Image: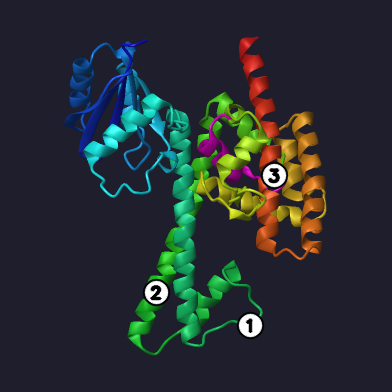
Amino acid sequence: MSKIRFVGLDVHADTIAVAVAEMGGEVRSIGVIANRLESVRKLIHRLGPVQHLRACYEAGPTGYVLYWQLTQLGVFCEVIAPSLIPTKPGDRVKTDRRDAEKLARCYRAGELTAVWVPDAAHEALRDLVRAREAAKKDQLKARHRLGKFLLRHGRRPEGLKAWTRQYMEWIKSHVRFDQAALEVTLADYLEEVDHVAARIIKLEKAIDEAVRQATPEIRTVIEALQALRGVAQTTAATIVSELGSLSRFQSPRQLMGYSGLVAREHSSGNRVQRGGITKTGNSHLRRVLVEAAWAYQHRPNVTGFLLRRQKNLALSEEAKKVAWKAQQRLHKRYKALAACGKNKNQIVTAVGRELLGFIWAIAVETEKQQRHAQAA
């Protein structure tokens, strides 16, 4: 056991700073290598037998390429949550060498928290879902530009809801300007709105196809989560692609803490002080949970799209039972918080946090059934 060497890697696009902490010994810098597979292979050969190496680096924009490279070389590697790395308040010097040494030292002491590393299937689905999310943000910006342009020039329809098909047809057929410059501006804004709408349609079709082609472990959980009100396929795919296997969370409370939807707290002695939500963890997950939580302001029922989803997907009775229990509890929770005078944003945040517990229950049971089916 004394031969174990802890390797801290400060990873950048072109370079990797390397430091090694010996078990019970010193922490020293090895230097800087190029962020290339051949350089990584030479480094591992230099450091010694792979069974004695424990490597780590911070999660960041370089993704998990280095993790996969080290794993293929036989090195145990973990990707570390940057926000949970211990820091000294008085430390004002930051360099790549010191960061690598700090990672190695803290890793040896067991003070670092590893993040979940997605496999190729989860990462591909996650990138596709995030591409749709980016397109939705671009659509909102494009609509704002066009809407504010029309407002500045006093062009507002009567009796038409914004961004419906009739609204777009009204703009294209009734909005005209005498100045050529304004006509060009209008045409450009309209083209951008139509272009982003086409992007979203294309990406949603791609998500549908990706879910159909996904592995049974991913597809069955996505389908089971759609038993819940407010959780259609895109939302379910986002949850699964961002979280992976929900069985890795020991309890719903642990999952809620991971999502950042729990209240922050600063208590000392007899004083207990709580504030807004921590907003740590995955922001994409929080967004879809809060969006889904709005559905629970309505009284419990199974009709329309929800009824069709439950019938078409042939969901298990257990999933339907949990989903119905979620409707009853979360609607009651919504009404109770509203009666206390809470604003709607606070209410849906609280409901979204509890919704995550029902998501955990359905996903864990589905994953358990899937494992039993594979073992049979």
Is 52 located above or below residue 177 in the figure? above
Q: Amino acid at mark 2?
A: Ala
Tell me the distance, in whole angstroms, between the alpha carbons under discs 1 and 3: 39 Å
The numbered disc on residue 187 is 2
Q: Is residue 59 left or right of residue 340?
A: left
Q: Position of residue 237 (x, y in %)?
A: 56, 39
Whether residue 226 appears in this view of the structure is no
267, 314: nearer the viewer: 267
Asked whether residue 279 is drawn in magenta, I would say no
Q: Tell me the element at label 3.
A: helix
Q: Is residue 34 left or right of residue 202?
A: left
Is 14 located above or below residue 289 in the figure? above
**Which of the 4 image quadrants contains residue 138?**
bottom left
Disc 3 target residue: 355
Q: Position of residue 285 (x, y in %)?
A: 55, 45
Residue at 41% of width from left, 77% of height from top? 186
Residue sitting farthest toward the bottom: 178
Q: Tell me the element at label 2.
A: helix
Residue at 82% of width from left, 46% of height from top? 328
Tell me the distance, in whole angstroms, between the alpha carbons under discs 2 and 1: 22 Å
**Badge 2 density bin: few <14, some 14–19, many ≥20, Cα 10 Å:** few
Disc 1 target residue: 158
- Residue span colored magenta: 229-245
